[in-house]
Image (cartoon, rainbow, N blue to C red):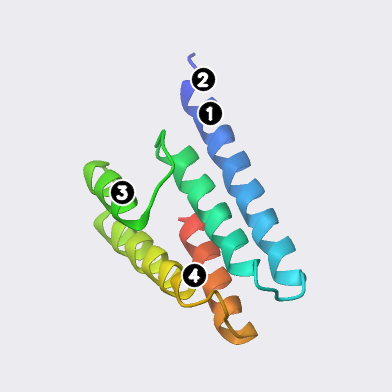
Amino acid sequence: MWSFKKRKDKIKTKLQEGALRELSKLKREKLSSTSIEELNKIFHVYLKEKYKIKQSLTYEELAKKIKSKKINHQIKLDIFALASKIQTIEYNSGEVNKKIFNNLIKETKALIRN
C-alpha cells in the first residue's frame, strides 16, 4: 500500500552510510590539528539531519534540542557524553593522540548505527 516507512528507512540508511563512510575516511587520514574539528562537523551534521535540527549548535544548544526530542534515554546520554568529550578536546587546543581519537570515532560510529 503506502510506502512512507520504506522511504523514511532508505533516507535514514543513506544518512547513516554517508556518516559512517566519512568517519572511515577520517580514521584513515593522518591525525592532524583539524581532525577533531572534522569529527565534530560529521557528528553535528548527522545529528542535525537525523533529528531535524535547523540551526548550528553549541554543546548547550545541542543538549537543549536533544532533550526536547523523543529519543531513547540511553541514546540521549550517549549523545551528551560524546559531544562533551569532543567539546573538551576542541577547547583544550584540539590536540589528541591517535588512540583517543580512534576511540572517539568508534563511539561515534556506534551511536550512528543505533
Q: What residue is pinned by disc 4? A: 90
| Label located before the other in sequence (2 or 3) | 2
Relative to 107, is 58 on the left or the right?
A: left
Work out whether 93 lies above or below 45: below
Of label 4 and label 2, which has the lower sequence position?
Answer: 2
* Dot 1 and dot 2 residues touching (CB under 8 Å): yes
Query: Label 3 to label 1, Cα distance in Å?
Result: 31 Å
Q: Looking at the image, which is closer to me, 33 or 14?
A: 33
Q: Nearer the viewer, residue 34 or 19?
A: 34
Gap between marks 1 and 2 measured at Cα: 5 Å
> Label 1: few (<14), some or many (≥20) within 10 Å?
few
- Residue 66 lies, in percent from the top left, at 30, 48
SS at mark 2?
loop
Contact, CB < 8 Å: mark 3 with mark 4?
no
Q: Secondary structure at mark 4?
A: helix
Q: Amino acid at mark 2?
A: Ser
How far apart marks 4 and 2 lie (CA) works out to 42 Å
Q: Nearer the viewer, mark 2 or mark 3?
A: 3
Residue designated by label 3: 61
Q: Which mark is residue 19?
A: none
Residue drawn at point x = 60 percent, y = 77 percent: 102
Left or right: 54 as drawn, with respect to 66: right
- Which residue is labeled 2 in the image? 3
Which dot, 3 or 1, sits closer to the camera? 3
The percent coordinates of residue 15 (x first, y second) are 58, 42
Task: Check disc 3 and report its element: helix, strand or loop.
Answer: helix
The answer to whether residue 8 is above or below residue 67 is above
User: What percent of the width, then of the height, locates residue 112?
Assistant: 50, 55
Label 3 to label 4: alpha-carbon separation: 17 Å
Q: Gap between marks 4 and 1, in whole Å? A: 38 Å
Confirm or deny contact between disc 4 and disc 1 (CB under 8 A). Answer: no
Q: Which residue is mark 1?
A: 6
